[in-house]
Amino acid sequence: MFYHVKELQYEAKVSRPDPVFAKKLQEVLGGQWGEMSVMMQYLFQGFNCRGNKKYRDLLFDIGTEEIAHIEILATLIARLLDGTPMESQLEAFNYDPALAAVLGGMNPQHAIVSGLGAMPADSVGNRWSADYIVASGNLLADFRANLTAESQGRLQVSRLYEISDDPLVKDTLSFLIARDTAHQNQWIAAIRELENKAQDVVVPTNFPKELQKQEVAYDFYNTSQGQSDANGPWAQGTAPDGRGQFRYIEQPFPYGPVPKLPLAPATVFNTPPKPLTR
């Protein structure tokens, strides 16, 4: 069961209306790497977590905090839209080129659809999609996806921080950036614990090694011109799992023959055609 605390986790103040920046903020609310995505990702990972009580609690704790971050951003967007009358926004896009220039770049749906409120969409109006989230049931795979999500999210909020010239907005964004720092470190710590428990880093850690083609398990194939990639730790030395040595293959070769498929049935009408008989 969830319950709502009415106070914001952190204040969401603005110095002045800025509908253009409100549109930009939609990206970190409803975009691929926005707060809606991490909230749903962590909660669904928690809902589906079997056993592993402390990891389930970790997922629910951070996932629930992300609900608070959505509320912060929704409040910030609404306040950036306050003081910009809906009528003026509509006129700007429909009748008044001069006013449109002043408000240029804003999201007209903030006036037409949401009534000067935040939307479950990104900065160009694409609706949030559940396709953005990962919840596989494998905690190591999922926690790595969570680390990626927090990394991309912190990157985007940092870029918005640099774009903004409103000190109050920047203060709110600095809080979100700090919390993304915390979450990245927490996912890294959880990943390391799972790797130490499994004594492996390759997902899934419990797939029988004898069932994979071990002779190619640590090869690096040079499939581009030049050999600059040969100098990286991914092409030489001991692999991170400690079970093999990387091998650099300068000129990769195919392991299989040219594929040969029979012609499709005539009723499919492929090219080249197979004679159709009646």
Image (tube, grey):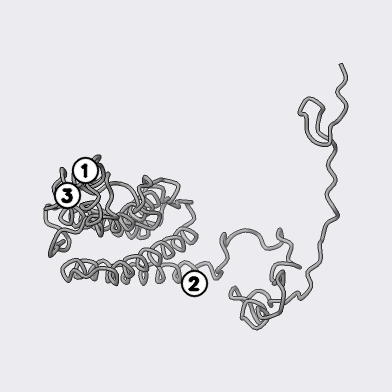
| Dot 1 and dot 3 residues touching (CB under 8 Å) | no
Please identify the quadrant where the C terminus is shown: top right
Query: Mark on residue 249?
Result: none
Q: Residue at x 35, y 69 (%)?
A: 186
Given the image, on which type of amino acid does mark 3 rest? His
Q: Residue at x 33, y 60 (%)?
A: 58
Given the image, on which type of amino acid does mark 2 rest? Asn
Cα separation between marks 1 and 3: 34 Å
Q: Earlier in the sequence, mark 1 or mark 2?
A: 1
Q: Is residue 119 left or right of residue 204?
A: left
Q: Secondary structure at mark 3?
A: loop
Q: Earlier in the sequence, mark 1 or mark 3?
A: 3
Cα separation between marks 1 and 2: 58 Å
Q: Which residue is mark 3?
A: 4
Q: Which residue is mark 2?
A: 196
Q: Residue at x 19, y 66 (%)?
A: 169
Given the image, on which type of amino acid does mark 1 rest? Leu
Q: Earlier in the sequence, mark 2 or mark 3?
A: 3
Q: Which residue is mark 1?
A: 90
Please identify the quadrant where the N terminus is shown: top left
Q: Tag 3: Cα neighbours inside 10 Å, few (<14), some, or many (≥20)? A: few
Residue 261 location, quadrant: top right
The total of numbered circles placed on residues is: 3
